[in-house]
Image (cartoon, grey):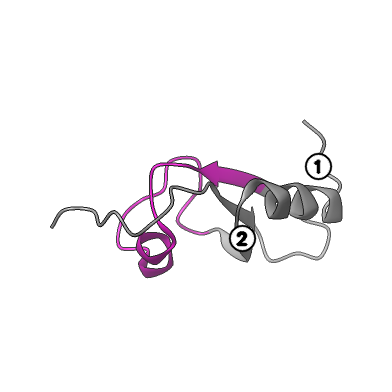
Amino acid sequence: MGREKAYLGLPIGIAFTTSDRKNAKVKVKVVRNRNIDELLKVNFVIPGIPAKAIIKEVVMGDALIAKVKEKYNIYN
C-alpha cells in the first residue's frame, strides 16, 4: 500500500506520559514521516514512545505543537 499524496506532510505532535500518576511528566514527540491516520491506528511501534504510554493529545502543525508544549510547560 503506497502513501497517498492527499496528505500535506504536516508534523504531528503526540503528548504522552509514561505512567498514570497525576504528577507524571508529560513529553511531546514530533513525528514527521507518518500521516495522522496511520498514527491513530497505532498498528506499529512509534520510536521514542513506549507501549505503556498514555496519550494525552495528538495535534497537527507547528503552531499547535507549540501550544501543546506551552500548555505542559515544555521548553526545548
Residue farthest toward the left in the current orientation of the protein = 1
Name the quadrant containing residue 33: top left
Residue 27 percent location from the top left of the image:
68, 47
Chief secondary structure of the magenta portion: loop
In the image shown, does 51 or 36 lie closer to the viewer? 36
In percent of the image, x 66 and y 59: which residue is there?
Answer: 19
Residues at circles 1 and 2 in contact by the CB criterion of under 8 Å = no
In percent of the image, x 70 and y 55: which residue is there?
Answer: 64
Query: Nearer the viewer's eye, disc 1 or disc 2?
Result: 2
Residue 1 percent location from the top left of the image:
13, 57
Q: What residue span does the magenta drawing correspond to?
A: 28-52
Tell me the SS state at disc 2.
Answer: strand
In the image shown, does 17 or 67 lie closer to the viewer? 67
In percent of the image, x 84 and y 49: which residue is there?
Answer: 70
Q: Which residue is mark 1?
A: 74
- Name the disc covering residue 59, or none: 2
In percent of the image, x 16 and y 53: which residue is there?
Answer: 2
* Looking at the image, residue 32 lies above or below residue 14: above
Tag 1: amino acid: Ile
Tag 2: amino acid: Val
Horizontal arrangement in the rendering, residue 32 relative to residue 63 (left or right): left
Horizontal arrangement in the rendering, residue 58 relative to residue 10 (left or right): right
